[in-house]
Amino acid sequence: MGMQNFLHSVPQYLLSLVEALRPKLHDPSFLARHRVRPEDFTRHRQLTFPVIMIFILQKTVKSIQRHLHEFLAGLAEEQIFVPPTSGAVTHCRAKLKESAFIELNRDCVLPIMYGSKHPILRWRGHRLIGFDSSLLRLPDSEELGQTFGWKEASNQTGATGTRYPEARLSVVYDLLNQMGLDARLEPSTLGEFALAIEQAKSLQPDDVAINDRGFSGYLYFVSILQRGAHFIGRCSTGSFLAAQEMFRHNRANQSKVVWLFAPPDQKAQYLRLGLPLKIKVRFVSLRLSTGELEVLATSLLDEALYPTTEFLSVYHWRWGHETYYLMLKGRMELENFSGRTAEAIQQDLQAAVLVANLETMLSAPAQAALTDKSIDATQPLQVNRSNAYHGLKLKLLDLLYRDIPAERVIQQLTQLFVGSPVAVRPDRKVPRRRRPSLHRAYHFQRHVKKAVF
């Protein structure tokens, strides 16, 4: 009964979210900004601008024709209709820019998420922002190969003579609040280091950027500091001299503040860009559960405000970025693209990031209820993310298109989220597998993997 009473109270920020998204989809100026040509979406057709937007957000592993028939059947509400062909969807998508999904995320979702009335999680007053990238295998298309580059396949005997298009996905990710702030899909030849420096503009003052070993370098550090933000970066054994010294001593819970200097051959470039030629950096050493020593570099210099012992837990939160990519590729089937053009690929990506952010916000009340319900349990309950994504997909038309009270739709979603939780097993440790065999990967894709779309 208590849970039912809870469902009658919908947070105001969620109502504001729906109230911001619904009119935006029907706003003529929004349409004008995100269509390819001025004459696009001017004729009255079944696949209008907001309809094709929601259709793409409802990405599915089914065929386009079958998805289209089910989608329009739900839209028609038992009225007789003649469904368009899958080719009509292709032509309609060619009129739409992926920037429409980016604007919805940037101007509607993120401002409400980080608004003053919505509590967000911080560590010692800082947002923890992850920088990382992942490689995506794209459909075998000449256009995609020319746009993103080709990956040559090889085995133990060398090149096989086959190739496929490959792209680099980089999402700036709020680790504690599970929100994608900026998503880019670029050629796989573009290094994640250069891409992260470009995406640093997503940072706000006092944010803490957290990165793995591939990013930690002087230029990356000063680019973060230039934004008024901080960094925590993992060091490799061959990086800075201070880090190398800590690795040699192999002692945990050590902290040392040193000056780092710009590389001599790059000083002129740094002066031209207005970047500092030296910065103070603190190095801390930590012992992992495996016994391995880990060394982190950070701009958080004060030991009293930022104790060395906390950095192990803080850096561990970076793993949420890895599971975010796993969710995009696994549960949301991002690599099972619904088109074979560069525009369709970008649309699928930005739509997936938007849907993931919506799921994070809409499932928050259910997670709060489950946390209260299992406060004394040995295995706390949490929202089943697979069911949450599937439920949100089914309710997108009600949530964003139909003239149904937003409160009712959100209550229905919350009831669904609360009704199918999963238990969290504390201190569970699963060995990390390195590149499974082709046989194991094939078995997983055919018999184990769960698709929620």
Image (cartoon, helix red, strand yellow):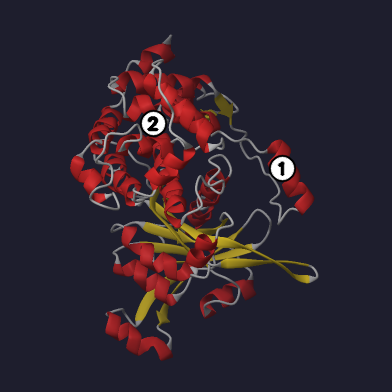
Q: Secondary structure at mark 1?
A: helix
**Where does the image place residue 219, in percent across and percent down from the top left?**
40, 76
Q: Residues within 10 Å of mark 1 (few under 14, many from 20)?
A: few
**Viewer-nearest residue: 453 or 127:** 453
Amino acid residing under circle 2: Leu
Q: Where is mark 2, residue-wise?
A: 362
Q: Residues within 10 Å of mark 2 (few under 14, many from 20)?
A: many
Can residue 364 be seen in this snapshot? yes
**Viewer-nearest residue: 441 or 202:** 441
**Where does the image place residue 110, in percent across and percent down from the top left?**
31, 44
Distance CA(mark 2)–CA(mark 1): 30 Å
Residue placed furthest toward the left: 29
Q: Quadrant of residue 277?
A: bottom left
Image quarter where the N terminus lies is top left
Mark number, residue 158: none
Marks 2, 1: nearer the viewer? 1
Residue at 29% x, 48% y is 103
**Where does the image place residue 288, in percent across and percent down from the top left?**
62, 57
**Where does the image place residue 40, in percent across and percent down from the top left?**
28, 46
Residue at 61% x, 36% y is 426
Q: Where is mark 1, residue-wise?
A: 444
Q: Looking at the image, is 262 positioned above or below residue 342? A: below
Q: Secondary structure at mark 2?
A: helix
In the drawing, does residue 309 fall left or right of residue 398?
right
